Amino acid sequence: KLVTPSRAAALRTTGPARCPGGGRGLWSGRPQSDTDNMKPLDGVRILDLTRVLAGPFATMNLGDLGAEVIKVERPGAGDDTRTWGPPFVDTESTYFLSVNRNKKSISVNIKDPKGKKIIKELAAVCDVFVENYVPGKLSEMGLGYEDIDKIAPHIIYCSITGYGQTGPMSQRAGYDAVASAVSGLMHITGPEDGDPVRPGVAMTDLATGLYAYGAVMAGLIQRLKTGKGLFIDCNLLSSQVACLTQVAANYLIGQKDAKRWGTAHGSIVPYQAFKTKDGYLVIGAGNNQQFATVCQILNLPELIDDSKYKTNHLRVENRKELIKILSARFSEETTSQWLYLFEGSGIPYGPINNMKDVFAEPQVIHNDLIMEMKHPTVGKIAVPGPAVRYSKFKVSEAKPPPLLGQHTTHILRDVLGYDDVAVGELLSAGVVTQHGAS
């Protein structure tokens, strides 16, 4: 396990670090001959009881850093997103495929006493326990933090909920669209004079997944310092409210409510999408020099010294008139022509790409954001790759998202030490299922 600094020097020579509960360690205790191959979470094992998006997104990112992720799924059904479609590839949902790489699937009925026992045994040999049940549900089954802490005091237990562990909304189911409404995100998203709009991807779920991912990393570092595990309370509402940033500060500091701006910005002009002859171009001018450059590119030099537009504050005050002038000019040329004219100008600019354009974008290809892998039943698939690269190691080579229960017998035998007879009895009783088993 992660260890305290006072023990670190001794562990370099005496062998692998362990913590109470017998979990596996971040510290191998062995010298590395090739440190460029050592990932930060090599040796960390994660027990993943999450489904849908926020939790699976968090654990997938941890898996990219080398962690072994054991995904617990319901027999016969699995993660809810296995059925979310179309689109499907053969029988596999592309939604599920997008956020479950680098995981092993064990299919266990956790309501069965024998299934509950398996989860506790796995917790004892894992470093991290991640779940996204309504507060109290796992405690009713004897799998809450207090229960797991007794058998695995080293555990980093991360609970992802809709609204938090306690409080008037804590028992509500957590869904991205509802949380994004309650948190105010929908209030500020959509056309200026139109209805509220849900973002095109589940940004509240994804933000929560990233917060949970970071919190687990912080928990592992804390355990390095203290030798003890801890409980992490992560929820959709808190994540999204925290992500309101300057919009929330405008209200909290100045009591100024927010509004919808479409593609525009409430405090910077121009900073939005403009319709071209054949598409859209987004540009931003965050200071006076950038505004002058935009005017020169658009061949509208008279705007540079116009008293109504000389500062950003004035441009915001006279937004409608200025945007009308700029919009008329942008509509006269194609997107490709504007891209050519803005190239090298120092102005932030770019087209609004569809998915085909995104994955043909040279920078997207250069950043290695298309991750290909061979799936056991549908063949070659591709998903968005990790967003971050590191100088001293490569992220884990992508393993395809697992089939439901694909690794059940492997985990029971190789991780928990069950013999063939015990595994056979669990399969026969329906406590666990194995993909492909008759």
Image (tube, rainbow, N blue to C red):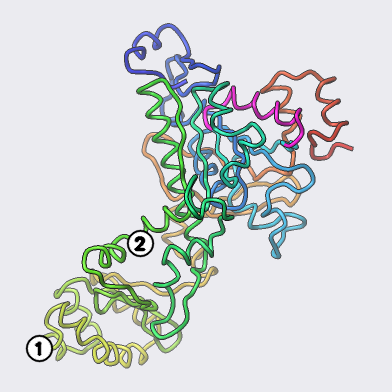
The residue identified by callout 1 is: 307
Which class describes the residues within 10 Å of circle 2: few (<14), some (14-19), or many (20+)?
A: some
Label 2 vs 1, first from the N-terminus: 2
Residue 139 at x, y percent in the picture = 61, 36
Would residue 113 be counted in the magenta stretch? yes
Amino acid bearing label 2: Leu
Determine the residue located farthest toward the top in the rendered image.
14
Q: What secondary structure prevails in the magenta region?
A: helix
Closer to the camera: disc 2 or disc 1? 2
Q: CA distance from mark 2 to mark 1?
A: 33 Å
Determine the residue located farthest toward the front in the rendered image.
168
- Quarter assignment of residue 390: top left
Would residue 61 be counted in the magenta stretch? no
Closest to the observer, 336 or 95 = 95
Residue 94 at x, y percent in the picture = 66, 57
Q: Is residue 361 left or right of residue 423?
A: left
Residue 19 at x, y percent in the picture = 48, 17
Whether residue 17 is situated above or below residue 264 in the rendered picture: above
Q: Which residues are magenta?
A: 111-128
- Quarter assignment of residue 392: top left
Quadrant showing the C terminus: top right
At 34% from the left edge and 11% from the top edge, which residue is drawn? 9
Q: Is residue 298 left or right of residue 46?
A: left
- Quarter assignment of residue 250: bottom left
Whether residue 351 is situated above or below residue 127 in the rendered picture: below
At 71% from the left edge and 65% from the top edge, which residue is drawn? 86
At 58% from the left edge and 54% from the top edge, which residue is drawn? 383
The residue identified by callout 2 is: 244
